[in-house]
Amino acid sequence: MKFVIGLLKAAHFGPTIAVTLVSLLLAKNLWWEGPALVIAFGIFLGQLLVGWSNDLNDYQDDLKHNRSSKPLVSGVITTAQLLRAIKITAPAAVVLNLFGPLGIKGGLLYLFGVGMGVAYNFYFKSTLLSPLPYALAFAALVSSLVISTDRLVPIWLITAGALLGVAAHFANVLKDLDQDLTSGIKGLPQRLGKRASRVITASLLILTTLLLHATVANTSLLVVGLIAAVITSAAPDSVIFKSLMVTVIVDVILLINATNSKIGSFVV
């Protein structure tokens, strides 16, 4: 049991579940429950790979900063076990996403997003282009769901996904920003600093909220987004990313409930 819990923690369980839940909500709005659950599970497998590769790549740095909450550092799991889990999960993720309800087009697009997540872990994390994989991965995720139903992807959905992806990047970095700098990790948020990163995160949340509200007018959605922006400006660093993930889930629920038709009907 400890081993399984360790694997889930190494996959960054909170964000992984948040992305999976958002995918399930959107998929249920495009499919019926059966295919939606299969899609969500395929996306879950992809997120496991992103999280595991992150912890694997960060292992030495996590040891340096004694991040004992990380299962590799605490010894709950070993690097060999994590590598084995990646080797088992990777082909399953590829097969399920390509040959499941997403189909070849949707599956390839989602797997491209997974590839962007892995590329961030091993390369983009320490570059000025660090937000790019997040923008592409989030945009690819929402787009893959729509493409799988042979609809055109609305521009507002791609834009909202990209904006939330970049916001997630800046929010996620805040809690470890100082330690990252001592380790020589200098992505765009680290170079800009905490104050600027907070402002950027809040601004992106406001932009996304206004975009969604303009697409489907909904006062509740507007209020939630603005409150989240305020929290981003004042909350402790460790809370901001969690607040953003909750906001995304609530926004998706409000967006879907505010419409009496499928996302595809917005495509013109």
Image (spheres, rainbow, N blue to C red):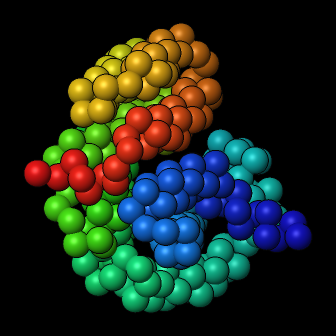
Q: Where is residue 162 in the image (x, y as percent from the top left)?
A: 28, 44
Report whether 189 appears left or right of 66.
Answer: left
Q: At 37% across and 84% down in the image, what residue appears?
A: 98
Q: Position of residue 247 (x, y in %)?
A: 51, 32
Q: At 41% across and 35% down in the image, what residue appears?
A: 258
Quadrant of the drawing holding the N terminus: bottom right
Report whether 267 appears left or right of 4.
Answer: left
Q: Where is residue 164 in the image (x, y as percent from the top left)?
A: 36, 39
Q: Please tell me in which quadrant of the rendered image residue 16 appears.
A: bottom right
Q: At 50% across and 54% down in the image, what residue appears?
A: 25
The answer to whether residue 138 of the structure is visible from this angle is yes
Q: Where is residue 109 in the image (x, y as percent from the top left)?
A: 28, 70
Q: Which residue lies furthest to the right in this view?
A: 1
Q: At 21% across and 42% down in the image, what residue appears?
A: 156
Asked whether 44 or 37 is in front, the reply is 37
Q: Please tell me in which quadrant of the rendered image residue 226 appears.
A: top left
Above or below: residue 98 compared with residue 199: below
Above or below: residue 240 compared with residue 104: above
